[in-house]
Image: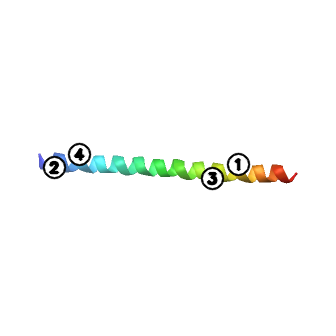
Amino acid sequence: MTDFLKRLSLIGALAVMIGGLAACDNTIRGIGADINDSAEAVEDSTE
């Protein structure tokens, strides 16, 4: 029974880590898109 609980907690911890990494990836991509949008706006305003 304790082996089952250890494995279950390990799987749960891995799922949380994967979810956290996915959220960080989306945040970084979002920041990159915002920076690109800002750069394009600056370029457009100088023309």
Q: Residue furthest front?
A: 45
Label 3: few (<14), some or many (≥20) within 10 Å? few
Kindly report the distance in space between the C-alpha atoms of the residues bearing marks 4 and 2: 8 Å
Where is mark 1, residue-wise?
Answer: 37
**Residue 8 has which mark?**
4
**N-term mark: 4 or 3:** 4
Kindly report the distance in space between the C-alpha atoms of the residues bearing marks 4 and 1: 44 Å
**N-term mark: 4 or 2:** 2
Task: Identify the secondary structure beneath mark 1.
Answer: helix
**N-term mark: 1 or 2:** 2
Q: Residue at (33%, 50%) from the top-left corner?
A: 14
Task: Identify the secondary structure beneath mark 2.
Answer: helix
Mark 4 in CB contact with mark 3 (< 8 angstroms): no
Q: Amino acid at mark 1?
A: Asp
Q: Amino acid at mark 3?
A: Gly
Q: Amino acid at mark 4?
A: Leu
**Residue 3 has which mark?**
2
Where is mark 3, residue-wise?
Answer: 32
Q: Residue at (81%, 53%) from the top-left corner?
A: 43
